[in-house]
């Protein structure tokens, strides 16, 4: 039997997930009464393997939940010269795949610009190439995200879910007291969306 570790939306070599033989649960909440804050939702297909603790948002077009797919720029995203491709050097490429439509904005929420679909991802340089050029440069530290509605954090996945070609029912937390290090995708914007408080080390409170 093999067990798995979160990486970054999947599993590899530690308890807290499952394979074809065994499911090993893990605790992401501080208290056992978290069940009263659990509800079923419809999870989109082809999200990759998802671990308990993934932050999810609701896609506008199909009404299905998906992980919040967002990262930050590690270098200024400049307006390309005429005829040149738009590239974005980012902190983390793993939330994205070719074909995803991206939005870029400054870290203060200004300069929001749609840059079209991803045409290439270079994993050696963490560089993404997109179809549409920026009209204004965005400084390092700005956000890059899939802007389909799911960028607004709403709930926390309560169970590990394997990837699949069809939508499926999954259980989520709408609030509770969580171990911070078990939450995946909880960046500064997600914290604002969820009205997070973090009063103690490794404690995240999401109000209901």
Image: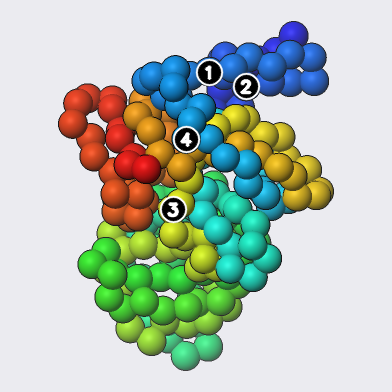
User: Do labels 4 and 3 touch, CB within 8 Å?
Assistant: no
Residue depth check, mark 1 versus mark 2: number of the one nearer the observer: 1
Q: Would you call the spot at circle 4 few (<14 residues within 10 Å), some (14-19), or many (20 or more)? A: few
Q: Would you call the spot at circle 1 few (<14 residues within 10 Å), some (14-19), or many (20 or more)? A: some
User: Do labels 1 and 3 touch, CB within 8 Å?
Assistant: no
Disc number placed over residue 26 in the picture, else none: 1
Q: Which residue is mark 2?
A: 17
Up the image or down, 113 lies above or below 42; here it is: below
Identify the image quadrant of residue 159: top right
Q: Tell me which label, 4 or 1, sits earlier in the chain.
A: 1
Residue at the image position 53 percent from the left and 81 percent from the top: 132
User: Do labels 1 and 2 touch, CB within 8 Å?
Assistant: yes
In three-dimensional space, the C-alpha distance between marks 4 and 3, rounded to whole angstroms, equals 16 Å
Q: Would you call the spot at circle 3 few (<14 residues within 10 Å), some (14-19), or many (20 or more)? A: many
Give the x, y percent position of residue 104: 41, 70
Q: Tell me which label, 1 or 3, sits earlier in the chain.
A: 1
In three-dimensional space, the C-alpha distance between marks 1 and 3, rounded to whole angstroms, equals 22 Å
Residue at the image position 68 percent from the left and 65 percent from the top: 62
Residue depth check, mark 3 versus mark 2: number of the one nearer the observer: 3
Q: Tell me which label, 4 or 3, sits earlier in the chain.
A: 4
Identify the image quadrant of residue 108: bottom left
Closest to the observer, 206 or 200:
206
Q: Would you call the spot at circle 2 few (<14 residues within 10 Å), some (14-19), or many (20 or more)? A: many
């Amino acid at each position: 039997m093999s067990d798995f570790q979160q990486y970054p939306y999947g599993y590899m070599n530690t308890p807290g997930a499952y394979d074809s033989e065994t499911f090993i649960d893990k605790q992401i909440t501080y208290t056992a009464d978290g069940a009263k804050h659990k509800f079923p939702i419809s999870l989109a297909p082809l999200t990759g393997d998802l671990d308990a603790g993934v932050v999810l948002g609701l896609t506008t077009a199909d009404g299905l939940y998906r992980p919040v797919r967002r990262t930050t720029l590690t270098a200024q995203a400049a307006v390309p010269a005429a005829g040149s491709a738009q590239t974005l050097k980012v902190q983390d490429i793993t939330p994205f795949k070719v074909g995803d439509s991206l939005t870029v904005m400054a870290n203060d929420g200004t300069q929001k610009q749609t840059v079209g679909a991803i045409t290439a991802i270079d994993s050696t340089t963490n560089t993404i190439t997109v179809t549409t050029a920026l009209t204004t440069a965005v400084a390092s530290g700005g956000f890059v995200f899939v802007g389909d509605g799911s960028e607004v954090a709403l709930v926390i996945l309560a169970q590990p879910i394997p990837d699949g070609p069809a939508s499926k029912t999954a259980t989520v937390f709408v609030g509770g007291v969580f171990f911070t290090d078990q939450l995946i995708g909880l960046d500064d914007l997600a914290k604002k969306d969820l009205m997070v408080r973090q009063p103690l080390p490794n404690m995240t409170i999401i109000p209901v």
